[in-house]
Amino acid sequence: MNPVNYLYLSALLFTIGAAGVLIRRNAIVVFMCVELMLNACNLAFVVFSRMHGNLDGQIIAFFTMVVAAAEVVVGLAIIVSLFRSRHSASVDDASLMKL
Amino acid sequence: MSFPLLTATAALPAVGAIATAAVPAERRTAAKWLALLVSLGTLVLGAVQLVRFEPGGDRYQLTESHAWIKDFGVRYELGVDGIGVALIALTALLIPFVIAAGWHDADPLETHSSRWRPTQGFFALILAVEAMVILSFEATDVFLFYILFEAMLIPMYFLIGGFGDRAHEHGDEAAATQRSYAAVKFLLYNLVGGLIMLAAVIGLYDVAGTFSLDEIAAARANGSLDMATNTERLLFLGFFFAFAVKAPLWPLHTWLPNAMGEATAPVAVLITAVVDKVGTFAMLRFCLQLFPEASKWATPVILVLAVISIIYGALLAVGQRDIKRLVAYASISHFGFIIMGIFAMTTQGQSGATLYMVNHGISTAALMLVAGFLISRRGSRLIADYGGVQKVAPLLAGTFLVGGLATLSLPGLAPFVSEFLVLVGTFSRYPAIGVIATLGIVLAALYVLVLYQRTMTGPVKAEVRGMPDLKVRELLVVAPLIAILVFLGVYPKPLTDIVNPAVQHTMSDVHKKDPKPVVEAAQ
Amino acid sequence: MENLIALLIAAPLLGAAVLLCGGRRLDAVGHWLGTLLAAVSFGLGVALFADMLGRTADDRAVHKHLFSWVPVEGFQADVGFQLDQLSMTFVLLITGVGTLIHIYSIGYMEHDENRRRFFGYLNLFLAAMLLLVLADNYLLLYVGWEGVGLASYLLIGFWQHKPSAATAAKKAFLVNRVGDMGLSIAIMVMFTTWGTFAFSTVFNEVGETGDGRNTTIGLMLLLAACGKSAQVPLQSWLGDAMEGPTPVSALIHAATMVTAGVYLITRSGVIFNAVPDVQTVVVVVGAVTLLFGAIVGCAKDDIKKALAGSTMSQIGYMVLATGLGPIGYPFAIMHLVTHGFFKAGLFLGAGSVMHGMNDEVDMRKYGGLRKYMPVTFITFGLGYLAIIGFPGLSGFWSKDKIIEAAFAKGGTEGWILGAVTLLGAAITAYYMTRVMLMTFFGEERWRNAPTPSPAEPSVEPAAEHRGEHAEPHPHESPGTMTIPMIVLAFGSVLAGGLFSINESFVKWLEPVTSLSHGDSPVSEGVVTAATVTVLLIGVGLAYAQYGRKPVPVVAPRGSLLTRAARRDLLQDDFNHVVLVRGGEHLTRSLVYVDHTLVDGVVNGTAAGFGGLSGRLRKLQNGFARSYAVSMFGGAAVLIAATLLMRAV
């Protein structure tokens, strides 16, 4: 199978993720969409690794997973504490970070 | 390897600053004494420099050189010439007086808790400024100098913005606003100048491939480094702009009255007598030495600006209602003289300008510190709030008058020698400019005497009645300054001996010879 | 012997330093110390004089190089002294009259709590004035020049709590600074011309300049002389300077400092001789001031201001004489010395009168005082006779010579100058007789006269101690005051005659000023006769006006000229309108410009950036999703740009 098709898939996943981040308000969903984008990137890396015949892409994919796992930990913790204090997981409610 | 005297002179106040800042909150007085001792120690080191310096010897002496940032060829290179060593002595001399005069300026108010720390901060910042100023007089590496030139803004910013006249303090929001405006203005002006200089510093590296002043000057002298005319002019302008902001030259002067007006008197002295001298010093050392042709190209414009500074500063001083702002405008006028002397490109002019830097530092310190004592007694900077002080506090009035007379360059006091040298040096090459600048001496008499008349003479104002005369601490601050003014006015030879050879070097840098007297030339 | 020259200056300088730094501890002995040091200086002067007389005329000048003052490549300023016949004359005058006035001040300032400071200033003045006349180069002379200006400033403003005194002091210093500017420009031109400003070199090489340099130097020196010697157009400060204590007016503003301009021109005679055009200007300045001062002197009711007008006028005579060149120099100096005696005496007399009259200065409130103050009357009277040029007294000898020299100038010029000097002599006789009559003769107008209100500026502060509000009880002054007056009266009577025996004074000065007699179109006898005639006319007119008729206590309105003269011929009004007002407007508008324009540009830039950032800040709305949109948008733009760059 032509590896380019996987790239199309990756682009599709990324777009879905990006659209989710922009459209949805629920922080958990936004968060999952971010994960989706990350995984789309991972997929692209692996494909490139395959296409170019070296392991660089795969290494970066693992690297991304580790970072993503760390990010999940921090992100979920923030969302939970936000929910506790505001009883809402809507990202639009938390708009205090402005000048 | 010999003892690194230059590094030590700058390192002592730097270490002292950290130590002072680290003194526990309650032990304020100990911090003050520590700062004073450190500054006196620095004074000793400065004196040792003066003694070790041989006027007839090499151009740069007591040199030190170490690799620093190898990738960019930045070196930690130090060395002093006669001009540098004189200005280091001035700085080291003035700081103890600044500290002693500001002894109570940063004391906590009753409303503050015992853990209040700014007292330590005040004295630590003064020492930090001293360290950086001294090192900038010693630096012979352009990059090192640039860093110091910019870094000294930070402690100065906090000194101006953080400490105002005590009398204004009590919940006076307007004064605090004014002060932060002044501090920000000071910082922005100097940062803009510094950034333009940074561009020129990088440009210089691009052209010369090194930051070392010695190497660039040598390469320029033997012709191996050839700058295109326009490149040299642009680089010159970049450097000069930064120095002209700091000096300050008209029309880049407006930060000075705000800064000096809002800061406490000792800090105002620090600004005008010490930090600003870095600007004029750098004109002599960097502008003339690195870009001699461009300097000559720019001379006419700079001289005109300098003369405008002289007259304009003096006229504005006459029109001021605030004592400290008046002194600030007087300083602008005096800086005009210094810059005029530097760019007149005569031996007398440049020697005069160098002496002027030293003498102006001492005379302004005397005048401003006494003014500060006066202001702290009445809690107002407005001239109109005073009157008849002479009757109540004759000692204060007397020292104030001597400071004022030094400011108007009365013969017999040090500033006269330098002012006359600058005038003669300018006149011999540019008679018209010299004559216009001479008008400055009449205007100087006007603003000093008007100030004295309005504050010290006349009927005693009710608020002034009962004003205490100078205290012992205050007298100890003023009397030595006056003694030095008199001594250098009568016998400036020790100073001229040190300065003369350095001026000869600068003159040969720009390939200029003094104009010959008419009669001698005819023979 | 030369080493004594430095001591001559050092003695009063030491006095000034000790008295001014010594504090209140010295209050009790301060005046004695000051007087002693002045006397020491006088003693040294006499010793040097004796030494000088012991040598032949050509060897008399001595020179003493002390140390190198400002050594800069190509610029040598030294501290060195030159004592020749001209400086010697001044040294004796300054220290002699100076010592007498110190003695006088002991009595006069007795009730002043700041007497020690007063003597400190007087000593400072002596030191500066001696430095001025002893310097061997122009730069050092300049130090003395400004030094006497400072002393004069301090002494005029001695009673600083009076706003009028403080203002007068400031005015004197400022006007003098304008003159000083001339001197410093002259020195700068000298430096560019000869590379030095030492007397010896400058005077030897004057002829070798060509172009207008000598003219410039001459005019600038004249400007300096005008400032210091209160000559038109810089004369306005002298009248106001009378705010100072009377001994100050006698010493500084009559006998010594104001004559420094005459010294400067005489000293620089070689330069002036080389440029006749400038000499003409000098003569014109002298002639104009001569009449100006005399006219002002006629209208003033304040005794000190009338004498100040007279001083101005007499110095006008001297300046005129110096403008005549070598035929005038010795007589200018001779008149200077005799004037030093009689004018100092007159001022001390005036001070004595004021001392006895509760510090009243208005002559309209005097009258008939000769009975109450016999010593003052006689000494003042002798001074009066001397100044109007009564035959045989000092003023006659010196003034007569100047009038002769004016005629000797030759041509139309000579006739005009001769006429002016004669006219001046007549007016001098008139206004001095007026002063004499109003003060010592006539009815006693001070009885039941309204006492001066405290607000009046002419009231001297010490008056409080002397019972200001009581009717004055005129009385003779104490011995410390009358003895100096008597000594000066002797000088007023005898000096001129002694100097003229065998032309001794002129010959004494010859090595410095060179001697030459002009050919006068009128014989000496005729001039003397004319002088005496105009003198009698002046006295007669004054007698008719003030002796025969009672003097009104309140001044009549007077003619236009009188009113103008009372206001110093409108000089102050001119200054006020043009310089003071104009200057105020200029500085005020500059302050405005600085604030709005120069600072405005900067603040405008700052405000511009502030506005921009205020607008940009709206983008930071806090909504995470709108940040995400801008992030994606940015990424898209970047990718598009990269692709586009590839494609190109």
Image (cartoon, coloured by chain):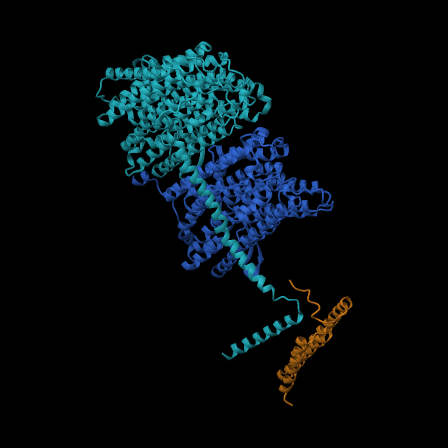
Q: Residue furthest bottom?
A: A1
Q: How far across and down, in percent of the image, does residue B85 sit?
A: 53, 43
- Number of numbered discs on residues: 0
Spot occupied by residue B125 in the image (x, y as percentages of width and height): 63, 47
Report the side of C92 relative to A64 (left or right).
Answer: left
Drawn side of residue C99 relative to residue C262, left or right: right
Residue lying at 57% horizontally and 76% vertically, measured from the top left? C639
The color chain C is rendered in: cyan
Task: State whether residue C463 is above or below residue C375.
Answer: below
Residue C627 on image: x %, y %? 64, 70
Q: Nearer the viewer, residue B354 or B73?
A: B354
Q: Quadrant of the N terminus of chain A?
A: bottom right
Q: Nearer the viewer, residue B409 or B30?
A: B409
Q: Is residue C273 above or below residue C585?
A: above
Residue C643, x across and y down, in percent: 54, 78
Chain letter of the blue region: B
Could one spot residue C298 in this view of the protein? yes
Residue B3 showing in the rendered view: no
Q: Is residue B153 above or below residue C226?
A: below
Quarter occupied by the C terminus of chain A: bottom right
The quarter holding residue A64 reads: bottom right
Colour orange, chain: A
